[in-house]
Image (tube, rainbow, N blue to C red):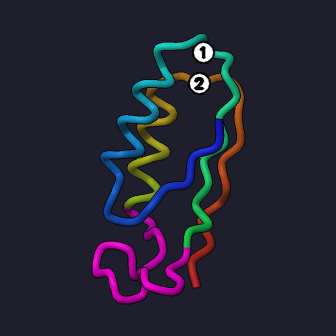
Amino acid sequence: VRHLVLPNHLNNTIEVLEYLSQFKKDIYISLMFQYFPAYRAINNELLNRKINKKEYERVMDYFKAKNFKNGWVQELLVS
């Protein structure tokens, strides 16, 4: 399962991880943090920036707490 984490929408990511945790713990999950605002998102105050370190850490803490065994997580690239 691939999931793109969006800024200001961490509750959506938490809900997705909670849902996926109902399945076998060996499910493969790919958490993607490469979002960047483009086109109309630049004018949307909820989506007009990249993920920040605090958001990244919150998602990672939750991901680890759910004890998923397999998957990939993109590093947070801070510019």
Q: Which mark is first along the chain, 1 or 2?
A: 1
Q: Which residues are magenta?
A: 36-54
Q: Position of residue 13 (x, y in %)?
A: 42, 44
Q: Which residue is mark 2?
A: 68
Q: Nearer the viewer, residue 38 or 52?
A: 38
| Residue located farthest toward the top when viewing the structure as drawn | 24
What residue appears at the point 35 percent right and 88 percent down from the top-left corner? 43
Q: Position of residue 50 (x, y in %)?
A: 48, 75
| Mark 1: amino acid | Lys
SS type, badge 2: loop
SS type, badge 1: loop
| Mark 2: amino acid | Phe
- Spatial separation of the CA atoms under disc 2 and disc 1: 5 Å
What residue appears at the point 50 percent right and 24 percent down from the top-left corner? 20
- Alpha-carbon neighbours of circle 2 within 10 Å: few (<14), some, or many (≥20)? some
What residue appears at the point 54 percent right and 13 percent down from the top-left corner? 23
56 left or right, relative to 24 = left
The overriding secondary structure of the stretch rendered in magenta is: loop
